[in-house]
Amino acid sequence: MSSIMTGLLIEVTSIQRFVFSTNLLKANVGASNIVDEIFIEELREAIESVTGQPFDMDRWRNGAQSQPPVDIGYIGGGNALIFTDSVERAKEIVKKFSTLLLERAPGLRTAYAIGDFDTEDFQKSNNSLFKKLSEMKKNFIPEIKLFRSGINAECPYTGEPAEVYDGEEGRFVSSTFLAMRNRRKSKFTEEIENLCDKEGFSLTDDIERFGQIKGDTNYIALVHIDGNDMGEKKKGFKELEEMRRFSCDTYKAMQMSFKDIIKETIEMFKEGRLPDTIIRLNEDNGKRYLPLRPVIIGGDDVTFISNGILGLYLTERFIKHAEERLSSYGITFSASVVISKTKYPISRAYELVESLTRRCKRIRKKKDINNSAIDFLIVTQSVSEDADTYINRVKTSMDKTLHFGPYSFGDDDERSLKAFKTCIKEFHNWKKERRTKLMELRRLILRGNKEDIEIFLKFNGLKLPIYRDYEINIFRNNTTPYFDAIDVLDFYPEELL
């Protein structure tokens, strides 16, 4: 191919919103499988339909020569760059690809940009195409679902017209739900299942079977992890091969890092590190269900569900594995964990965890944190607002903010995760020896009166855990880490600290 050609940039937008448009985990996983495969199956099918010849979607990963009249620039992070010999051919690919998505993935939103592309001036051409894509997203809202007949009955899972009878559910459902639930497993899902099977474990799509124990520990954790400043990193690549290598490396690192925490979780239960009074694994046909389920494993975007007690621990472990694998790129992550009752709607939990991640990224930049960061919320009732509004409403007292996160992975940072975990460990000792006083301390912190807390501590001969001088001035800068540390005790077992 000539260095000057037509570039077609495709972006899958609002992936998380599509995946979590229903409250049934099986459908969430199916929707994720759709997202995983559209740049493999549907895009290949669209290219073959337009060119009239077989097309190898993996040639670009292997550094093979181009395949005129169409070639893959790179695929990763929800984007695909396609090179074609003409604007007309690019438009035909868009037409065929978007038609296939309307049929097989109704509700999945995509955006497109077409323009001249000079591979010898990759950085300028790539950034120009992304700028054009951004303008297209602002000015054009595509129709992403086929028009329906006048059916009034609503699908119980998606809220859309229930126009298809589903024998498995024994009721009418929407075609969107059916497409999600019936989507075949992605290659990565099959690899994870095989890994579990070899160790006598199995994945489950039943959110009630994550090892919860009825009562205080009947919680799940929804985790969202997103790479920091990934757009700026992509804009900085001057050569096509750099972008290709980066896309392949991040994709592989995220998958391998998730396999790492799968293996570690299996080993944890085989060794009996957690007593069954904390997590009691469900079993079926000789297989134990793993209390962990990947939902989205993208280029720099990861979402998974676990037993509520494992959410924070597994998030930290995943980030450390991913950082190590991507150390040459200096990639860091922002992560959020929403811990909620098992029956709490997944779609609502997703909205909260997404807004908490945005907050994490914003505060990380504001405080010049150069390391990865993690934040969490524990919700026990229905929440309709975003994370900022919820924190201001629930975790603020007398102009003092009781929410201390996000916590930095940098040991020397003021809001260090390492220091926070040390604080949690000390409160675990309080919990064993003086639980009543621990709960009284929480009540006093919630009231926000510094003098009352100091009198309480002095009268009972107690000292706060050491944390960046907050043990001297509990409400330094009108905030404190101790409320978070007490609240998270039931969700960060001493055995995992």
Image: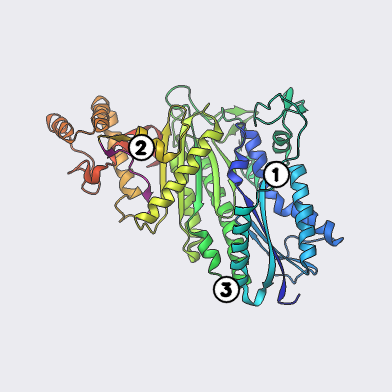
User: In the figure, is residue 351 to the left or right of 35?
Assistant: left
**Secondary structure of residue under mark 2:** helix
Q: Residues within 10 Å of mark 3 (few under 14, many from 20)?
A: some
Measured Cα–Cα span from mark 2 to mark 3: 44 Å
Residue 311 location (% of width, % of height): 47, 39
Magenta residues, dominant SS class = loop
Measured Cα–Cα span from mark 1 to mark 2: 36 Å
Magenta-highlighted residues: 399-410
Nearest the eye: 227 or 270: 227
Q: Quadrant of the C terminus?
A: top left
Q: Residue at x 26, y 32 (%)?
A: 430
Asked if residue 216 is positioned above or below residue 317 in the image, the reply reads above
| Count of numbered circles on the image | 3
Residue flagged by tag 1: what amino acid is it?
Answer: Ile
Residue 460 location (% of width, % of height): 15, 29
Q: Residue at x 71, y 29 (%)?
A: 161
Give the label on residue 238, or none. Answer: 3
Report the residue marked by disc 1.
Answer: 144
Report the residue marked by disc 2.
Answer: 392
Residue 391 location (% of width, % of height): 37, 37
Measured Cα–Cα span from mark 3 to mark 1: 34 Å
Residue flagged by tag 2: what amino acid is it?
Answer: Asn
Residue flagged by tag 3: what amino acid is it?
Answer: Lys
Residue 42 location (% of width, % of height): 76, 51
User: In the figure, is residue 139 to the left or right of 95?
Assistant: left
**Cβ atoms under marks 1 and 2 closer than 8 Å:** no
**Cβ atoms under marks 2 and 3 closer than 8 Å:** no
N-terminal-most mark, 3 or 1 = 1
Q: Quadrant of residue 136?
A: bottom right
Nearest the eye: 145 or 25: 145
